Amino acid sequence: MNGDIIRVVIVDDEPLVRLGLRRTLKDIPGVELVADCRQGLEALKVIRKEKPDLLLLDVQMPGLTGFDVVDALEEAERPAVIFVTAFDEYAVRAFEIQAVDYLLKPFDDERVTRAIGRARQRLKADGKSAGSADLAGLVSLANDRAPHLERLLVRDRSRTEVIAVSEVDWFEAADNYIRIHLGSRRELTRDTLSALESRLDATRFRRVHRSALVNLARVKSLKVEQSGDAVLTLHSGAQVPVSRTYRKELEAALKSPER
């Protein structure tokens, strides 16, 4: 970034979207539009030649997708990225790339201006030092848009990762933490099982034990013991105890057409 000027390249195959973005950027102080491109190969040439600070990058385009464009660039030559998409399902991949933001079509001038403001903050923080904070903000933003919790942010000393809750087999209480079971992987997040349960979709996730919350889509079988307790076997092979307190509600949920 040259002083307070952000040099921007627009990449989108829809002429009306490019036109709208050009008009909006023109009214934002401290923004210089370097080029607008219709497709990924053209964008790669422009990026390598002009070295912009920021891309407004469409996800779905003929030929190279927006993600393909980012993947084709060496880390050192990648500008900051704001993804532009009509599909919220691409948000998790955008988080993995640590995009500054993503604009969900249709969007208005105010939304674009806010995204540019986030980019300015990221660039002033010299890119990667602001990554985790921005990632947390994006996860919060995406969850706010959804009726139920859709994504979790997991941190350790060396990385920050976004996990889609649909990928989770089951959640296990571990003192003041929750152990997240994803096949053979285990991750920890600081939360309580009750608080997490209140934010999840009850048609997809069910409490089966005081220390276990299960993704119903991952259930393979339910075996009831003579005591009235039961054991769930998941597709991963994991076995999760089911207490009598939760068994009947679980059986009803497993039979539900909404599952």
Image (cartoon, rainbow, N blue to C red):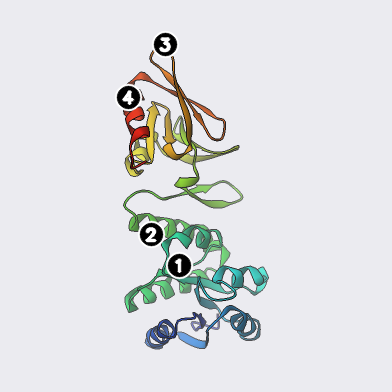
What residue appears at the point 42 percent right and 11 percent down from the top-left corner?
226
Q: CA distance from mark 3 to mark 2?
A: 47 Å
Up-down relation of residue 81 to residue 21 (above or below): above
N-terminal-most mark, 4 or 1: 1
**Where residue 52 sits in the image (x, y, percent)?**
57, 81
Per the image, label 1 sits on a secondary structure element best described as strand
N-terminal-most mark, 3 or 4: 3
What residue appears at the point 55 percent right and 76 percent down from the top-left corner?
62
Q: Nearer the viewer, mark 3 or mark 2?
A: 3
What residue appears at the point 43 percent right and 30 percent down from the top-left corner?
212
Q: Give the residue at mark 4.
A: 248
Q: Give the residue at mark 3.
A: 226
Up-down relation of residue 56 to residue 227 (above or below): below
Dividing the picture into quarters, in which one does residue 137 lie? Answer: bottom left
Out of 214 and 174, give the one closest to the viewer. 214
Q: Are marks 1 and 2 in contact (CB under 8 Å)?
A: yes
Q: Give the residue at mark 2.
A: 141
Up-down relation of residue 112 to residue 161 (above or below): below
Q: Give the residue at mark 1.
A: 101
Q: Nearer the viewer, mark 3 or mark 1?
A: 3
Out of 137 and 225, give the one closest to the viewer. 225
Per the image, label 2 sits on a secondary structure element best described as helix
N-terminal-most mark, 3 or 1: 1
**Where residue 153 sits in the image (x, y, percent)?**
48, 50
Q: CA distance from mark 4 to mark 1?
A: 43 Å
N-terminal-most mark, 3 or 2: 2
Q: Are marks 3 and 1 in contact (CB under 8 Å)?
A: no
Q: Residues within 10 Å of mark 3 (few under 14, many from 20)?
A: few
Dividing the picture into quarters, in which one does residue 114 lie? Answer: bottom left
Amino acid beneath label 4:
Lys
Q: Are marks 3 and 4 in contact (CB under 8 Å)?
A: no
